[in-house]
Image (cartoon, rainbow, N blue to C red):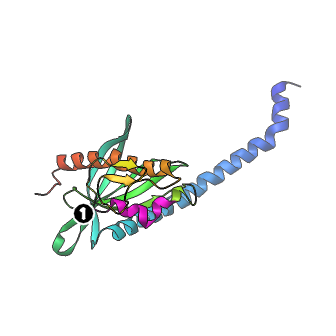
Amino acid sequence: MSKIKLFIQQSWLLIVSAFFFGLLLAIAQAAWGPRIELNKSQKINDLMSGLLPAKNFKIAAELSIVPQKDKETKVSLYQAIGDAGRTVGYCFKASGPGFADQIDLVVALDARLEKIVGFDVLASNETPGFGDQIMLDYYRDQFKGAPAQILNLVKTGDPKKIDSEIVAITGATVSSDAVVSIFNNYVQQIKTAAADKGLLRE
């Protein structure tokens, strides 16, 4: 008996099972993929609504930036529209590596892209009790009203003082730095790209 024939006789069940489960995964992805994307889009809309007092949001531009080395990313810049059609700010999704996994944020800037309005966490698997504190108000509030410029992470300081210094979460420096890095990797490029699109207002 040849080795190939022996291999087929001994592994046919494994081959059939792998094909069967692969087919099931493909079917599940095709069936649930649109629903998953819809839920994710709805969550982004909910987070944006919590950050900016807008009646509706529309995509103002699709921007190309390079938040990580040699990796171009397309970013949808959402315009938050308030009363009388007035622009109250802009939102966008920003991502970067955290301590455990990728962190996805929804970031809000004011209408002139000069100040950070705030951020919320779209997805994160940071360590419970430590890194997941990036979701808590006491950490997120440091960003509200901070300049839309390069931010610096510091280990000690007054977290209630609103400036370009962000005080790290005790025991979760990596997660704290990850959020600051996401801001630094995205905000300046978003501002430049938006200016190139003529979105900045006088």
Query: Could you tell me which residue is drawn at 46 percent across and 62 percent down?
Result: 135
Q: Residue furthest front?
A: 157
Image x and y of residue 83, in percent: 19, 75
Q: Which picture quadrant has residue 44?
A: bottom left
Horizontal side of residue 121 vs 129, given as left or right:
left
Horizontal side of residue 79 vs 74, given as left or right:
left
Verify whether residue 143 appears in magenta.
yes
Image x and y of residue 155, in percent: 43, 50
Residue 77 makes an appearance in the image: yes
- Viewer-side residue, 173 vs 1: 173
Image x and y of residue 23, in percent: 64, 50
Of the residues shown, which amino acid type is indicated by label 1? Gly
Instruction: Give the quadrant of the C terminus.
Output: bottom left
Query: Could you tell me which residue is drawn at 48 percent across and 49 percent down?
Result: 173
Query: Could you tell me which residue is drawn at 69 percent across and 50 percent down?
Result: 21
In what element is the residue under mark 1?
Answer: strand
Q: Is residue 83 above or below residue 43?
A: below
Verify whether residue 73 appears in magenta.
no
Q: Is residue 11 above or below residue 36?
A: above
Q: Residue furthest right?
A: 1
Q: Is residue 46 above or below residue 121?
A: below
Q: Which picture quadrant has residue 18?
A: top right
Crowding at dot 1, Cα within 10 Å, few <14 / some 14-19 / many 20+, comes out as: many
Q: Which residue is mark 1?
A: 89
Q: Which picture quadrant has residue 104?
A: bottom left
Instruction: Give the quadrant of the N terminus.
Output: top right
Chain part drawn in magenta: 133-145
Residue 37 makes an appearance in the image: no
* Prevailing secondary structure class for the magenta stretch in the rendered image: helix
